[in-house]
Structures are given as structure tokens and as C-alpha cells.
Image: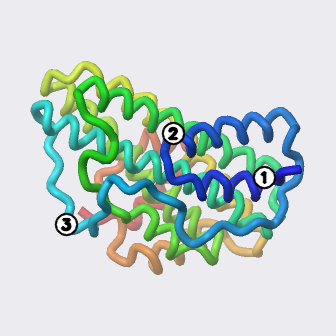
Amino acid sequence: MTTLSEAACAVLAAAAPAEKCRLTRAFAADWREGRITEMGDALPSARPARPERPRLLPPRDMPRRSYGGEKGRIGLIHALAHIELNAIDLGWDIVARFAHEALPRDFSSDWVQVALDEVEHFEMLERLLGSLGAAYGDLPAHDGLWQAAEKTAGDLLARLVVVPMTLEARGVDTTPPTMDKLARNGDTLTPPALDIIYRDEIRHVAAGVRWFTVVAERRGLDPKAAYHRYMAEHYPAGLKAPFNHQGRAEAGFLRDWYEPLARE
């Protein structure tokens, strides 16, 4: 019988986005409906499989995004689709890589659901690209998200701080103004898709905050002090302001955790 960690490794080993999405849906249903019951101890490789396209560039070499015109829309949607494809893998990676933590079943269920949400996001963005005569892989993309995963592979608290509590929290900060910019430029299709992603991101940040608190307390740490220590290690320059305080509050992310780290 397949274990959940084996299922996670199978998704991570799937190079084709369509297969990655198909396997995620199938394994998420198996877990939810009790056909997969054991965590297992299969360990994922350091990097997930990737399709031949898009070409991956260092973040500094990526072209600047535009919000205007069809070309700008395609560039933005393509970049977001790449983030969501990486996020599918990040959801499964946290399930398998940290199975040794022996956390409650709800921990795995939360991150399986995150991976399933990211499948919905990726496919929604793929459809938007198709409506514009484009496809995922047409443009270059950067590898920053998985580099962050590699740097935090040895510590669950570090992974939670960097991925849901910083990178996804940054999405909660920036998505509403991005939607406003697109709407002002006459885009009526992309903002509704981003609103779906935004609402799900709040839940993902909430899962990060919740499980960071649980794991920190299990280790005998004060959660807020531990958060500041990890942030000093991984983001010594602090966090870029302004913050979406309302969205972060909905995620249970307290201002006295992140606001002292603000930089303009």
C-alpha cells in the first residue's frame, strides 16, 4: 500500500505539470478518503523533476514585469503560474521531508490541501495564458522558490518561516494592489483569478503560523522569539513594507511579530 510520503515523492518526481496536477488530485483524494493511512518514511530528492521548459534563470536576470498590454499580462500570468507550480511541490515536500517530526495527521492534511489549492491556481493561470494565445514554458522563469526550499530542508521551523510566513505572506501584501493595477489597465479576467489565489494564500499563511507555533512550543521555544531569531538568520535586512495588516490578521499573524522587522 502506498504511504503518504511515497505519494509525495511520486508527485515531486513527475516532470510534466499535467501529471503533477493529476497525481496531486488522486493522492489528495486517497488521503482524504482513507485509502492512504500511513505516513511512511520515503524521503524526497533535493530537487523535484521539472519540464524542459521554461528556461530557469537567476532571479537577478529576469526581465522586469509590466502590468500593461497583452505582453505584460502574459508575462505576469506566466510568472505567477511558475510560482504556483513550485508551490505544488513545496506542499508535498513539507509533508515527506518532515515526516520524522511525528506531527498530528492534521499537519499533513493541511499541506496536502495546500498542494491541491496550488493545482487549482496553476491550472487556472494556464487557462488564462491559453486565452491569450500563450502557454506555460513560453517565457523564462526563476528558481528562487526552490532555492529557498533547499536552504530550509534541514529544519521545519525554518521552512515554515521562509515559505508560508514570508513568501506567501508577501503575496498577501502585494496581491490586492496588483489586482488594482490590472483593473485600472482594463484587465477584467486576471483580477478575479488573483482574488481566488489571495483568499487561499491567507489560509496557507494561517497554516504556517499555526504549525510554527505548535512546533516551537514542542521544542520548548517561545514562538515569537523563535520567529525573530529565524528571521534574523534568513532575512537580516528585514521585511519590505507596507503590509496588508487585514489579510495578515485573517491569517492569525500578529502585528507584534512582523511589524518590528519592517523596512521601507
Q: In which quarter of the image is residue 141?
A: bottom left
Q: In which quarter of the image is the C terminus?
A: bottom left
Pointer 1 with pointer 2, Cβ within 8 A: no
Does the CB distance between marks 1 and 3 fall below 8 Å?
Answer: no
* Residue extending furthest toward the front: 52
Residue at x 45% of width, y 75% of height: 234
Distance, label 2 to label 3, CA atoms, is 28 Å
**Which of the 4 quarters of the picture holds residue 189?**
top left
- Mark-to-mark CA distance, 1 and 3: 37 Å
Residue shown at 65% from the left, 36% from the top? 25
Mark 2 or mark 3: whose residue is earlier in sequence = 2
In front of the other: 131 or 186? 131
Give the label on residue 61, or none: 3
* Residue that mark 2 sits on: 18
Determine the secondary structure under disc 3.
Answer: helix
- Residue 117 on image: x %, y %: 56, 37
Q: Label 1, on which residue?
A: 4
Closer to viewer: mark 2 or mark 3: 2
Q: Position of residue 13 (x, y in %)?
A: 60, 58
Question: Residue 20, labelled with which disc?
Answer: none
Image point (56%, 56%), residue name? 90
Q: Distance between the residues labelled 1 and 2?
A: 20 Å
Mark 1 nearby-residue class (10 Å; few <14, some 14–19, many ≥20): many
Amino acid residing under circle 2: Ala
Asked whether, in this view, residue 34 is left or right of residue 110, the answer is: right
Q: Where is residue 170 in the image (x, y as percent from the top left)?
A: 39, 52
